[in-house]
Image (cartoon, rainbow, N blue to C red):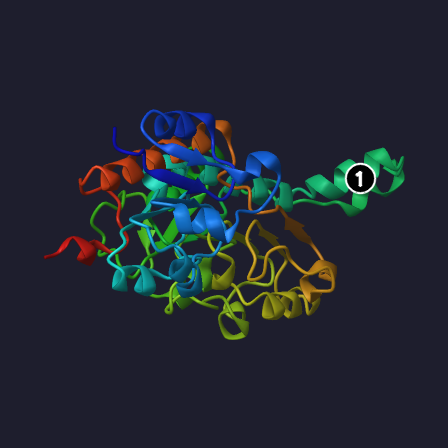
């Protein structure tokens, strides 16, 4: 009998994905022993599945047998796509539309509401027995406010649906890759980023990290936002210049900011954003629901198996590897 292909999984994935792989592969999951993977395990792997682990050219040099890389998630900035393509190794991933759009959208709205109504500070006030200062926690109602959505893919569209139907917000969107097709009539498409920032009471980000989007929100673009506005980022950390954001918050040029993702993770404790006023953070968990994790695990496992079986997967970051 031929040997089973070896799949190295660097971080925890949900059981449905593991079960799918274990039917026809030898699964190496060092995280089950609370340890990192070894070079020997990497060298033996026919397939590699990662979440946040970096797959660099040096990593690929060790993984001499590798036939496919699976990214359990949407962003691909932790995988050296060019290095993989040079080795003709397909990189498969799990786009938000197929796996986690609703989970991220719900977390986005939760952060928006919690920031607007001082949810964390209010909880602490109760626990500290500090009722007499509750008048300092004056919140912001979102009904009839303008929500600006930057990046109108599956997540942005779901956020728009929740906020328009559930909260009665006016929606304006900016996406340079959309020409109006597929945008609901009730949503205004902004002609420029500046137009959206100037009109919005809340700005939420839903776009990938690329050369064009790194520090899209910076000292200059922050100046276009209203001093009464809120910023929410559940997309990619590099999209926001967090030092510039901290400065804007301190100077009162922005009312508040909620972030689930950061340029450096974890955010250093001495980072200026840590002490900036009216901030709310979560540790990169927007997609972390049981249902979303199971969908992602199944999708990445299925696509890895497709490549190992000589088939072309549905979501591949470097399709040129399949060209003869």
Please name whichever residue, 208 or 117, is drawn nearer the observer in this view of the structure: 208
Residue 88 pos. (x, y %): 24, 57
Residue receiving disc 1 = 124
Q: Is residue 25 left or right of residue 52?
A: left
- Number of numbered discs on residues: 1
Q: Residue at x 53, y 68 (%)?
A: 222
The residue lying furthest to the left in this view is: 324
Q: Residue at x 62, y 46 (%)?
A: 282
The residue lying furthest to the bottom in this view is: 220
Residue 138 pos. (x, y %): 72, 45
Please name whichever residue, 116 or 12, is drawn nearer the observer in this view of the structure: 12
* Vertical comparison of 185 with 317: above or below: above
Q: Quadrant of residue 165?
A: top left
Q: Residues within 10 Å of mark 1 (few under 14, many from 20)?
A: few
Q: Quadrant of residue 319?
A: bottom left
Residue 36 pos. (x, y %): 57, 47
Q: Is residue 288 left or right of residue 273?
A: left
Q: Is residue 85 at least partly visible in the picture? A: yes
* Vertical comparison of 209 with 166: above or below: below
Q: Quadrant of residue 223?
A: bottom right
Please name whichever residue, 89 or 243, is drawn nearer the observer in this view of the structure: 89
Q: Residue at x 27, y 42 (%)?
A: 184
* Vertical comparison of 248 with 149: above or below: below
Which image quarter is the N terminus in? Answer: top left
Q: Is residue 84 left or right of residue 127?
A: left
**SS under mark 1:** helix
Residue 120 pos. (x, y %): 72, 41
Which image quarter is the C terminus in? Answer: bottom left
Q: Is residue 143 at least partly visible in the picture? A: no
């Amino acid at each position: 009998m031929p040997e089973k292909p070896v799949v190295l999984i660097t971080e925890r994935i949900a059981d449905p994905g593991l079960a799918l792989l274990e039917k026809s592969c030898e699964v190496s999951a060092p995280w089950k022993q609370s340890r990192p993977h070894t070079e020997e395990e990497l060298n033996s792997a026919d397939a590699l599945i990662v979440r946040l682990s970096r797959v660099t050219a040096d990593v690929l040099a060790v993984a001499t047998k590798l036939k496919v890389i699976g990214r359990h998630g949407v962003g691909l900035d932790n995988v050296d796509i060019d290095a993989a393509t040079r080795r003709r190794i397909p990189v498969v991933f799990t786009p938000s539309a197929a796996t986690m759009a609703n989970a991220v959208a719900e977390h986005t709205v939760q952060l928006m509401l919690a920031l607007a109504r001082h949810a964390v500070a209010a909880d602490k006030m109760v626990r500290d027995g500090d009722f007499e200062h509750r008048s300092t926690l004056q919140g912001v109602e979102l009904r009839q406010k303008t929500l600006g959505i930057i990046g109108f893919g599956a997540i942005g569209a779901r956020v728009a649906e929740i906020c328009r139907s559930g909260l009665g917000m006016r929606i304006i969107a900016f996406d340079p890759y959309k020409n109006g097709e597929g945008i609901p009539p009730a949503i205004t498409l902004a002609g420029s980023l500046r137009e959206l920032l100037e009109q919005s009471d809340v700005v939420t980000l839903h776009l990938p990290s690329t050369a064009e989007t790194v520090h899209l929100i910076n000292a200059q673009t922050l100046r276009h936002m209203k001093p009464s506005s809120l910023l929410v980022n559940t997309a990619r950390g590099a999209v926001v210049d967090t030092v510039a954001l901290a400065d804007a918050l301190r100077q009162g040029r922005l009312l508040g900011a909620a972030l689930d993702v950061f340029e450096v993770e974890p955010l250093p404790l001495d980072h200026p954003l840590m002490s900036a006023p009216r901030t709310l953070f979560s540790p990169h968990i927007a997609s972390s629901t049981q249902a979303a994790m199971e969908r992602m695990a199944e999708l990445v496992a299925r696509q890895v198996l497709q490549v190992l079986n000589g088939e072309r997967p549905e979501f591949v970051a470097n399709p040129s590897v399949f060209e003869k």
